[in-house]
Amino acid sequence: MEQSRLVKYIKALSPKEREKFHLFVHSPYFNKHDKTVQLLQLIEKWLERPSFSIDKPAVFTKLFPKEKYDEQRLYNVMSYLKKLYHNFLAFRHFEDTPFQGQLCTIEAAYENNQFDLMKNRGKLLEKDLEKHPSKDVNLYYTSFKLNKVMGYYSGMYEDRSKPTLLQGMVDSLDRYYILEKLRHSCHIMANVIMLNTAYKFHFLEELLKYIDANWQEYENDTPIVLYYTIFRSLEQEDNPAYYTQLKEMLANDIPKLSKDEQGDLYSFAINYCIRRINQGDRDFQRELFQLYKQGLKAGLILDNGILSEWNYKNITALGCSLKEFEWTEDFIQIYKEKLLVERQENAYNYNLAHLYYNKKLYNEALSVLLLVQFTDVKYHLNTTFLLLRTYYALKDTEALLALIETFRIYVMRNKKMTTDQKKGYTNFLRFAKKLVLLKHQAAAYTRSGLHEKLDHLHTKISGTRNIINKFWLLEECRA
């Protein structure tokens, strides 16, 4: 029973949320089924004392003393408690969504012809909206819904000649749509760039042209400006003006944005730096490192307390590249617990291996790399590349050349990589093979002859635009 979804759901709740769920289940308004209360008590007892038996027959006996074991009957109780858990999630989401309760009160009052209550609550909500710290989607959505109720009430029962409320409804709906359309288009566009995916951005081009033509109307609306700028920075990557504007917003406009918008601002600024670094612009490394540290300190790189395994990897790689080993080791250990539980060990082992490699502890790196599982394309590519460099450092030429060929075939057959990504990796593997044959068979050349060939290879690599991990190749040509 410990492996049931119900038990796993309850176990995953924080102590505070578990206490709220306890109150929810014990509330006679939400639950009139005594057996679900008893079942929750048994699960809670097991969570406090794992030695306490929670297997199905034992639980059934506790719920139905002296009765013959009936698994279906137990499943019925479990199913009802699970439904209560689902309702609890919905209720908590309702509670946590800004203005949601106030809106529902106003709409319900309107539907029940309780117009005095509706107008009273409407005025209070209007004041709350005026005090709301940012012009986010919650504000625009709530303003749309409020003006809708009050506007149609006014048009039906009071003065139809006053268009203010319905105009406010339309304006708020427009801004809600614009903000949501831009925000999700940014996330989808980033996905298009990173992965071999395609989407249809209906009405987006028309919307961007409309914003350009009416910029004065939106230039003081910080969230709309934010996502407009992010999208343009993705669309026109070679134009630094948009990234410069994102930096200005980081410095000046953070208080005007919601937590989600602040997180997006950091995330897209970080991703811009990463793309520039991958293109060979090393000046962005230190700037990116500072962005990561600021984002971690402010909690904006975490999503609901969870750190993405890819941010975990990128921060580790950058810290190692800048030789911030002490800070990076602390980061790897501290933030391991912030990763998704099911991804923790894989991400931890990969990043620990990366740190060992950069500290020149090659055998330790190799032993930890062997624990990494290829759960997706990114882990396969990143782990293989790190394994390749480790074999190179250990001067295991035979294993290295075999890995290069295996890696090349994997890249060429992979349908999830874009053409540019494949080209970047195949260019790397082609030059890596030449470098290996030169450096690991150095005895076949005179010293001056080897330097001449390495210089020639360095020139060829420098002149090739699309190469993954170009820095490493160039450094090894000079080493």
Image (tube, rainbow, N blue to C red):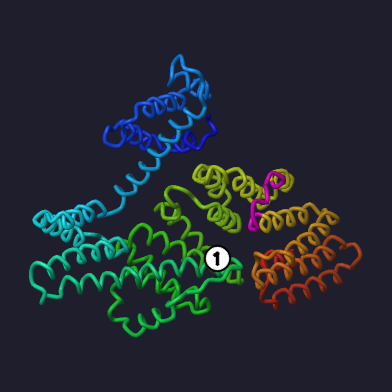
Q: Position of residue 363 (x, y in %)?
A: 74, 45
- Please state if 339 lies on the left or on the right of 350 as rendered: left
Residue under the point 50% across and 78% down: 236
Identify whether 465 is placed above or below 26: below
For the view shown, which residue lies furthest in the right direction?
444
User: Is 448 left or right of 388, judged from the image as shown?
Assistant: right
Quarter holding residue 275: bottom right
Q: What residue is shown at x 34% (from left), y 68% (from top)?
A: 223
- Give the SS element for disc 1: helix
The quadrant the C terminus occupies is bottom right
In the foreground, 258 or 460: 258
Residue under the point 53% across and 67% down: 284
Is 437 left, or right, of 427 in this rendering? right
Q: Quadrant of residue 472?
A: bottom right
Residue bearing mark 1:
274
Q: Give percent across and percent down for residue 421.
A: 66, 69
70 lies above or below 423: above
Type of the residue with mark 1 = Ile
Residue at 40% x, 79% y: name it. 208
Q: Residues within 10 Å of mark 1 (few under 14, many from 20)?
A: some
x and y, in percent, of residue 108 in the image = 20, 54
Residue 372 magenta-drawn?
yes
Q: Quadrant of residue 209?
A: bottom left
Q: Is residue 287 left or right of residue 144?
A: right
Magenta highlight range: 369-379
Pick the front one: 325 or 300: 300
33 or 379: nearer the viewer: 33
Dominant SS of magenta comes to: loop
In the displayed structure, would residue 11 be above or below residue 240? Answer: above
Residue 29 percent location from the top left of the image? 26, 36
Confirm whether the magenta stretch covers residue 155: no
Q: Relative to 59, is 396 above or below?
A: below
